[in-house]
Amino acid sequence: MVSVSGVRGLVGQDLTPELVARYAAAFGALVGDAGRAPVVVVGRDARTSGVMFAAAVQAGLQSVGATVIDCGVVPTPTVQLAVEHHGAGGGVVITASHNPIEWNALKFIGADGIFLDAERGARLSELVASGRLARAGWNGIGSFMLDQQAVARHVDGVRGLPYLTLETIRRRRFTVALDCVRGAGGTIMPAVLEALGCRVAGINLETDGRFPRPPEPVPEHLDELSALVRQSGADVGMAVDPDVDRLALVDEQGTPIGEDYTLAFAVRAVLGASGAGATGAQRASGGGRRGNQTTVVCNLSTSLVVEDAARDFGAAIVRTPVGEANVARAIMETGAEIGGEGNGGVMLPALHVGRDAPVAAALVLELLARSAKPVSALVASSPRYAIVKSKVPRGAELRRVYGAIEQRLAGATVDRTDGMRLAWPDRWLHVRPSGTEPIVRLIAEAPTEALARELVAAGAGALEIEGAGRIGPQA
């Protein structure tokens, strides 16, 4: 699958070393500048296929004269930061993010530390298809070097966030239950939490890529973490996905609260910060504002709890199509103070414009320390909504069914920038083809689960009529 999220497939079937090397070579050619040899940063998550694909990426890049800076097993946001640190032409991350263990993928980062937009992604695919790449001779092969400080720089960057009151967090001496699903999170999450004065009770911190559970950190996959919270008396449970750009939370009672609360809490931490640091500087200069309003950016599938958090501080919400690159570019265009996606991906431009679980963890702890409330009380203090997620196999031409869904659900505000989103003041339905799997996703949110299920059922009915397949629960 080729999309704004990169190139991904089943290891040994769709995704092979030969294909990976071709894409890497094309990317090296794409980021080259006027004949000057490009510099490309490479990193990977802990998947067992990662070593093989890292070798293929290195070979492809060096074959077009690119200098490779290898970070090893690191989080995706660590690679984004390393691209900026080295002034590189771009970066390649070998990770399938939340996909199951049999998948892997390549994600491509531009010189600005942001994933390629659709236009440059299409240009990359054209280069791969053309096969017309100028390969280096014996005296033009790119060099190779290691960057063993990338994670340490990332930790320092989180610790230095201007929104944090470090002494307040450290005085609370939080106990955090942590699940890194044996991905790249073990390289950074314990270090970040310990730097903030936390005691860490960890599971699955090994970085061998042998996921003990489905890797997406959704509530139904966090039973072991919930038990650990109760056993350890933790103040909060935190789970990351294999490449550490998403953070999910479990409250102090062992109840998963849903990934959308991660971004909502982060918004409250940032917008509720005192006038010190970046907040004061940005507001004094008008940064992060639309007119007289601070701006928060999120995607079309993000929960209303994020809108509520923004509204409490008088902030405007800008919604974008799903995909980190789309949110990142909207953050840059609007000068937003914070943004992200409702899957637990928090993006804080004070450090970099990319989803970053270590940043999210620090902001959540800041909010807990500042409010002196447990996680469950913070959840209870906001309006509650129910989200229902379902999916069908991708088959029908979706444009044929959007009209039918719209007729079934009249009176909505319609947005077709990414599939179709129908919105009312207290509920919404989003129907869109996935960019990471061959499925169509249906996501609905409403004040009750029954109302959310009615919205999903209405969308699913139209899809089934068009032969998209039988509806099923989100896995």
Image: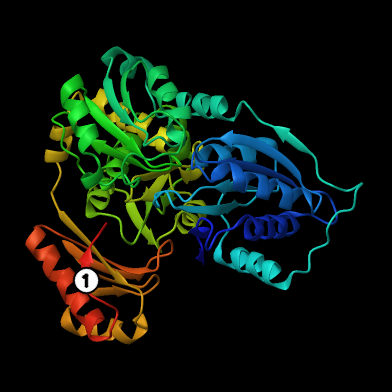
Residue 192, compared with residue 246, is above or below; it is above
- Residue 377 vs residue 239, the one in the foreground: 239
Q: Position of residue 232 (x, y in %)?
A: 20, 20
Can residue 425 be seen at all in this image of the molecule? Answer: no
- Residue at 48% in and 42% down: 47
Q: Quadrant of the rendered structure where residue 153 is?
A: top right
- Residue 243 vs residue 268, the one in the foreground: 243
Can residue 412 be seen at all in this image of the molecule? Answer: yes
Q: Please give the residue where the numbered disc 1 appears in the rendered image.
A: 471
Q: Position of residue 191 (x, y in %)?
A: 44, 22
Residue 444, compared with residue 33, is above or below; it is below
- Residue 189 vs residue 13, the one in the foreground: 13
- In screen coordinates, is 363 left or right of 66? left
- In screen coordinates, is 269 left or right of 25? left
Q: Position of residue 177 (x, y in %)?
A: 27, 26
- In screen coordinates, is 263 left or right of 191? left
- Residue at 33% in and 55% down: 317
Q: Position of residue 412 (x, y in %)?
A: 21, 74
